[in-house]
Image (cartoon, coloured by chain):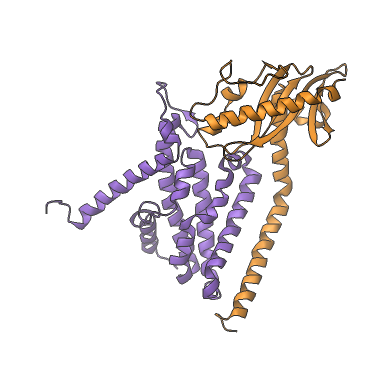
Amino acid sequence: MNKDGHLYSIVFTFFLTAFFTAILAVTQAVYLQVITANEADVHRRAILKVLNVPDDSFFQDFAANVSQQFLGESAVYVIYNPDGTPQSYAFPMNGQGLWGAIKGYIGVSADFSELLGLEFVEQNETPGLGGRIDEEWFKAQFSGIRITPGQPLVYGEGIDAVTGATSSSNAVLGLLNNTLEEVLALQEVLSP
Amino acid sequence: MISGAQLKALAKRNIWDENQVLRQILGICSMLAVTNLLSNSLVMGIGLIFTVSLSSWTISLLRQWIPHRVRMIVQTLIIASYVIFFDIIIKANLPEISRSLGPYVGLIITNCIIMGRAEAFAQSNPPLLSLLDGFFAGVGYTVVLVAVAFIRELLGFGTIFGFNVNFLALETWTLMVMPPAAFFIIGVFIWILNIRSQGKVSGGGRNG
């Protein structure tokens, strides 16, 4: 067959593509479980962190300690007191940052009066600038904050933005306020 | 087989004389993006060495059968396969680093160095030689990447590989964290290199 002919080019490219795609498909299949488990771990750690339970035994036996419930499309994670009353709730938080999606969780006390914590599982902000929203000092500022319905959180009153990363900081605050608003709307459903 | 002298010449050419970044000015995009942290730079460098070696090897193996008119598509396909393979491996085994590298791993595909070695070397040289050529080109890139990252992380964060060395608690230099800093540093590197090679060409004396 003529090496520079159309038919040869098509046949060659077709089989080469099939070959490499097959290799990648096999690799993906082999590692899929590990990758999914890694991702699930990141989420579990984040949920436990916003619920203020850094206890490793909770992580080991996540399903037994944290109950996952669905309200329509949104998930909620609940830890119960020994007497069966809810101790705290964790809600997923999704939205847009400066460069890409920001995903994370917030923890809220059982009576919805206190923000327990904030943690990210995915963010694509500039490393070293906006990416500093993922640093401990920044996230720790949101622990133990009083939630007042109808009063969005603002920077300056006990919460500092990241210097040089105004857009990312504002994105986080906007995201947090939106999520809190949605969460407060769920309060009646969760604790009648 | 490849002799020791040949190997040495190949290494010297790819790491020093024709350094991909400082001489050929290739791979600058990733040089700006990942070099504010040493750990990210190192993984990026290893990823590139892996990809450029193996894709050069594969392209060289297939060089007699690759139709000329679709060779670039074929090269891209091979490069992309290795990059995705590398991405899956680090996602599974080094999830933390995978998270911090984010989209940059996928962008290895577009790193001009890899296609540059494929076009300039692998398609007209035997497999083993191409693999080594790619390897040393990758090492040359990684050396510069890590050197730039060392300066940027030290001045921008006051840390080295995440360990705090800013004992005097000096103010860190925000510009160093941002991509443009790499421009200045690479510019200075190229400047120094040019002065050195100028000296060689004119026999060591500027007035001579």
Q: x%, y% of residue A14?
A: 65, 71
Q: x%, y% of residue B51?
A: 53, 56
Q: Quadrant of residue A98?
A: top right
Residue with the most extreme bottom position:
A1
Please state if B88 lies on the left or on the right of B120 as rendered. right
Label the purple chain with its letter.
B
Q: x%, y% of residue B92?
A: 66, 45
Q: Is residue A2 above or below residue B55?
A: below
In percent of the image, x 45 and y 62: which residue is there? B117
In percent of the image, x 49 and y 54: which residue is there? B111
Residue B121 visible? The answer is no
Label the orange chain with its letter.
A
- Quarter of the figure that contains the N terminus of chain B: bottom left
Q: Quadrant of residue A20?
A: bottom right
Residue B188 visible? The answer is yes
Q: Is residue A112 above or below residue A91?
A: above
Please state if A90 lies on the left or on the right of B203 as rendered. right
Q: Is residue A94 above or below residue B110?
A: above
Q: Is residue B119 above or below residue A86?
A: below
Please state if B158 lies on the left or on the right of A162 as rendered. left
- Quarter of the figure that contains the C terminus of chain B: bottom left
Q: x%, y% of residue A192?
A: 88, 20
Residue nearest the viewer, comparing B11 with A181: A181
